[in-house]
Image (tube, rainbow, N blue to C red):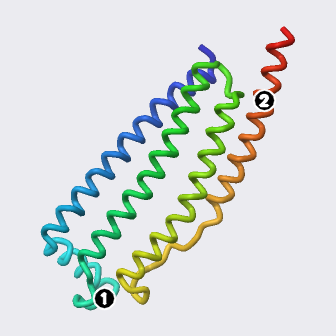
Amino acid sequence: MTKLTKISRYGEVFAKILMILLAIAMIVMVIMLVAVAFNTEILTEALEEVGTTFDIPAEDLNVMAIATMLTVCVLVVGALGIAILYFVNRMFENICKNNTPFTKDNARYLVVIATLIIVCTIAVPILDFGLQRVLDTAYYPSYGFGLMPLFVAFLLYFLSLVFKHGAELQKESDETL
């Protein structure tokens, strides 16, 4: 077994473990938020503590709207994270199966991962904005829009072009032999 295959096997296992942990975390968060929806006193007390930190008057707290928005945030960001890990896992599986990273499938997986990173980069500020509307912008600290994930997405797209070219060279080499 080559070093690349061995590392890919570890990466495959690690990506699967992360997907499972993220799915469990999402399920736990959703269960907690649904439980809060049926017993708003829990969230109200917690938010009043947070509210005192940010000087939010208790009457300004819309508990159901906050619980709903947090559920949406958890589901969207969690689903995007699982999707990214799924394609990373597929890439590792493909490397193990073919004993080379240079396949058109891997190039396509890199493009999909880059696209999902861009979607996540755009979705987080939108969800953040929705949460600001629910809480009140005067009190809620904002996360904003990050350029680093866009740079990472650009690098992954560039790598996909390298992988695609490598796959073409690999095909030519195999046909020559």
Q: Which residue is mark 1?
A: 56
- Residue 166's disc is 2
Quarter of the image with the N terminus in it? top right
Above or below 121: residue 140: below
Query: SS for tag 1?
Result: loop
**Figure quadrant of residue 117:** bottom right
Residue 81 or residue 139, whichever sits in front: 81
Foreground: disc 2 or disc 1:
2
| Residue type at tag 1 | Ile
Write the residue at 51% across / 34% down.
89
Task: Please state if 67 lies on the left or on the right of 78 as rendered.
Answer: left
Check if mark 2's residue and mark 1's residue have beta carbons within 8 Å: no
Quadrant assignment for the C terminus:
top right
Judged left or right of residue 130, residue 102 is: right
Horizontal side of residue 108 vs 92, given as left or right: right
Mark 2 or 1, nearer chain start: 1
Estimate the spatial distance between the alpha carbons at disc 2 and disc 1, rounded to whole Å.
57 Å
Dot 2: element: helix
Residue in the picture at 29% in, 76% down: 65
When the figure is inspected, residue 6 is found, relative to residue 47, above or below; the finding is above
Q: Position of residue 49 (x, y in %)?
A: 23, 79
Q: Residues within 10 Å of mark 2 (few under 14, many from 20)?
A: some
Where residue 157 appears, x then y in whole percent? 71, 47
Task: Name the image quarter holding residue 42.
Answer: bottom left
Amino acid identity at mark 2: Gly
